Amino acid sequence: MRITNVLLVSTIFFGFTAGANAGYTPDFDGGIDVRLAIQAAIESAASAGGLVPAMPGRPAPETPVWVSMEKSDVGALDGALFKRAPVAQNKNIAVYEFDPADLGQLADGMYRAFHRAPGYFAHDTLEAALQDLEAPPAPPSRAYIIDQGPRLKGILARVKEESIVSVITSLSAYKNRYYSSATGVDSSKWLQQLWGKFAEGRPDISVAAFKHASFAQESVVLTMLGAAEPEKVIVMGGHLDSVAGGGDNPAPGADDNASGVSVTHEVIRTLVESGYRPAKTIKFIAFAAEEVGLRGSGDIAAAFKKQGVAVVGMLNLDMANYKGSPLDIYFITDNTNADQNAFLGKLVDTYTDYKWGSSKCGYGCSDHASWTKNGYPASLPFESTFAQYNPFIHKATDTLDKTGGRAEHALKFARLAVAYAVELAK
Ligand code: BES
Ligand code: ZN
């Protein structure tokens, strides 16, 4: 295969109006740290046919990264950033070679065109990017039976708003939890310590860091080993990192996504303090580096698939505390599993008085997409409709005071997640 090393025509987004974007800080480092991947990317390109010499006027990127994105998105950005041919494509998705220095402009263009950023998958190697062109294998369908009412009654009664507030407060006190910043690393170490306490006196519980090859922030994994079928695994969690324009900018990320990690923490706390022991294994994960292209969950879901881990279901908790819409919970229907979403709706109906609906991101907006891509059933119960999402995210103003210092909304997600864990891990 021939690799076309098309040049990026320097693009300035003066054509866009400010309006909804006021206050957005462009991320000119793009949040992609590829130093360790440079050699692999070059070698991968070389073995696939070599790089075509650069056109005059601008040198070829020394350190390419590989970006996969929806072709419909590329169409909307046309004339701005995509004066380049894709390296490969299928009906819906195209893979492009990028100079990492230009990813900031891509993220900025995505934000201006679609009010989201960055909205693409960044890969260290061409090989990994090409996998995005393959349709994810359909997970086997399973029967979802709801029959844990008596047991759940006592467990659900223990779920508390205050402990969710307390963890959001601690996490959002870090200057940022950016995947490559010192405080981003510190926040992961802090969570490892906090979760480590749940393992005391419980030989069936362990806490480990998942180290990523190309960035410093570690994902955090708490494993509750199944007593009857330990090889079957339920995954639940959300991303630990935060972003506000990239780099070391202040990014409290109280809603995006201290809320999801705190809900995950609350599920663990409630289950442990109830003395609950699952029949199947439950892995609670705080994912590193979501905000820079789902990189943490991408590594973990790919590793699980490679090792043949039987993931029964994945619940992504990303943004849970800002009630932007009339209903309580909205299930995101794209890049998720319809059967599992229906099961979650039934759990809401069975165990709560909450009202739920559906919404769509329109792209792989969070870590559930990594699990879907690797053939596992995944869901994202979301705090609002996509159209009405929290306007403070990805800014220094994503703070807990926006919800009056409360976590009433997140509490609903904690109850649902407890029910999900107990009904699925039986
Ligand atoms: N929590 C957001 C995803 C989100 C935002 C979902 C608004 C629904 C409404 C997540 O942290 C994020 O920012 N994702 C990126 C995409 C990802 C591939 C880097 C985004 O939405 O731009
Ligand atoms: Zn985000």
Image (cartoon, rainbow, N blue to C red):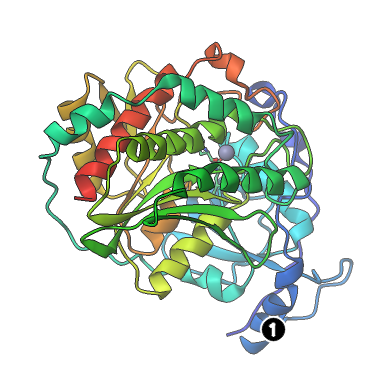
Task: Choose between 11 and 332: the one closer to the eye.
Answer: 332
> Which residue is drawn at the image coordinates 79% and 80% (left, top)?
53
Give percent across and percent down for residue 149.
Answer: 13, 33
Determine whether the residue tagged by mark 1 lies in a helix, strand or loop: helix
Q: Quadrant of residue 412?
A: top left
Q: Residue furthest right?
A: 57
Q: Residue furthest top?
A: 404
CB at disc 1 and ligand 1 closer than 8 Å? no
Q: Residues within 10 Å of mark 1 (few under 14, many from 20)?
A: some
The answer to whether residue 393 is seen in the rendering is: no
Amino acid type assigned to the residue bearing label 1 in the image: Glu
Left or right for 415, reference 288: left
Q: Quadrant of residue 157?
A: top left
Rendered view: 400 above or below 194: above
Give percent across and percent down for residue 188.
Answer: 63, 47
> Which residue is drawn at the image coordinates 39% and 64% (left, top)?
374
The answer to whether residue 148 is seen in the rendering is: yes
Rendered view: 271 above or below 397: below
Give percent across and percent down for residue 352.
Answer: 22, 23
For disc 1, the marked residue is 43
Left or right for 15, reference 210: right
Task: Choose between 197 and 417: the one closer to the eye.
Answer: 197
Left or right for 222, reference 85: left
Left or right for 55, reference 295: right
Q: Residue furthest front?
A: 201
Give percent across and percent down for residue 120.
Answer: 56, 52
Q: Quadrant of residue 101?
A: bottom right
Q: Quadrant of the N terminus?
A: bottom right
Total label count?
1
> Which residue is drawn at the image coordinates 62% and 30% (left, top)?
170
